[in-house]
Image (tube, rainbow, N blue to C red):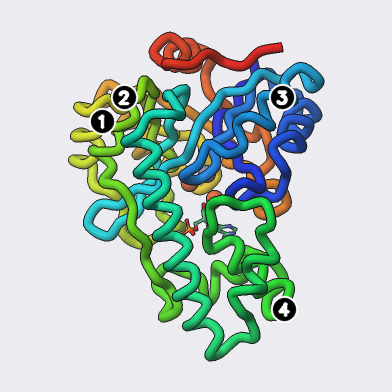
Amino acid sequence: MRIDPHAHSSRSDGTDAPAELMAAAARAGLDVVGLTDHDTTAGWAEAAAAVATTGVSLLRGTEISCAADGVTLHLLAYLFDPEDAALRDAFARARRSRDDRARRMVDRLATDYPITWQDVVEQAPQAVTIGRPHIADALVSSGCFPDRAAAFAGPLATDSPYYVRHWALDPVRACELVRSAGGVPIAAHPRAARRQRRLVPDETFAAMAEAGLAALEVDHRDHDAAGREAARDLARRLGLGTSGASDYHGAGKPNRLGENLMPPGLLDRVVAEGALPLVTA
Ligand code: AMP
Ligand code: FE
Ligand code: FE
Ligand code: ZN
């Protein structure tokens, strides 16, 4: 069983439409792919409709933006009720705040780079969740940078003067909300030191474990060898499972589908505990 439980479509900051992601998953030889767009379930229906033709099973999820004391953390949530009011409200609030924050970043950038809000909107015609990757795409299309990675290494970095924060859920509260919506939470890339200087402390993961966290994503390309070891050790100490994933974003990142996988035993547990089934052919 080849399970890649964390991938993005053009409904957030990936570049493949949900059906294209399913086709790419088939070409990558996956049995199961997780669609986990940021703060939305908007791609689920289109991806589910592609299960029969691709033969790839769909694990429905969302990557929830969280923050504790100004440190961001991404929480993967699987197989929750998409109609749950509290979770829907949180997603909507995060998307509104992301929109507002992206406009403010573009205002700041526009003093030094030739981009407008309209340029960003044009880069993201299918997106319901706007993020820095779309601003990166606008900077690339205006010729300022060769690719997203270069824009992230420059003006889009978290310590850049152009960076603006957005509202995000507290991660312990997010675990509670996901569980009360029948879902299963897994912390994404918890030791990705490349992304920001400060990392979420172990105590926060302990509190998340109390609130229902099921596992930590250990095998992820944003973890170096020490980060993987630290994440694996933390999972062991907290009695959590360990996962792995590509975090595929289509052409937006070098991450390739299937480059890291979730152990089948963990998928069994997610399906057993989740409110929704896998979508299978
Ligand atoms: P945001 O959530 O808007 O702050 O932007 C964070 C998103 O940017 C993450 O979900 C990543 O997918 C993406 N990202 C972070 N670093 C890079 C990078 N170096 N190249 C491309 N995308 C990146
Ligand atoms: Fe992303
Ligand atoms: Fe993430
Ligand atoms: Zn992701």
Pointer 3 residue: 49
Contact check, label 2 and label 1, Cβ < 8 Å? yes
Is 7 left, or right, of 219 in this rendering?
right
Cβ of mark 2 under 8 Å from ligand 3: the answer is no
Disc 1 residue type (three-letter): Glu
**Quadrant of residue 58 within the rendered picture:** top right
Q: Amino acid at mark 3?
A: Ala
Q: Tell me, yes or no, if residue 223 can be seen here.
A: no
Checking the image for residue 176, the label placed there is: 1
* Front label number (3 vs 4): 3
Q: How many angstroms separate mark 4 from mark 2 (CA)?
A: 43 Å
Lower sequence index among marks 4 and 1: 4
Residue 238: give x, y in percent of width and height: 24, 26
User: Which amino acid lies under the numbered mark 4 shown in the image of this protein?
Assistant: Ser
Residue wearing tag 2: 179
Residue holding disc 4: 142
Q: Residue furthest bottom?
A: 111
* Relative vertical location of residue 141 with respect to residue 238 in this rendering, above or below: below
Q: Is disc 3 placed on a helix, strand or loop?
A: helix
Tag 2: Cα neighbours inside 10 Å, few (<14), some, or many (≥20)? many
Image location of residue 226, percent across then percent down: 41, 44
Image quarter hosting the C terminus: top right
Return the x and y of residue 217 as percentages of the image width and height.
44, 34
Image position of 16 (left or right of 80): right
Where's residue 26, x and y in %? 77, 26
Q: CA distance from mark 2 to mark 1?
A: 5 Å
Label 2's element?
helix
- What is the CA distance from the residue labelled 3 to the residue labelled 4? 36 Å
Callout count: 4
C-alpha gap between disc 4 and disc 1: 43 Å
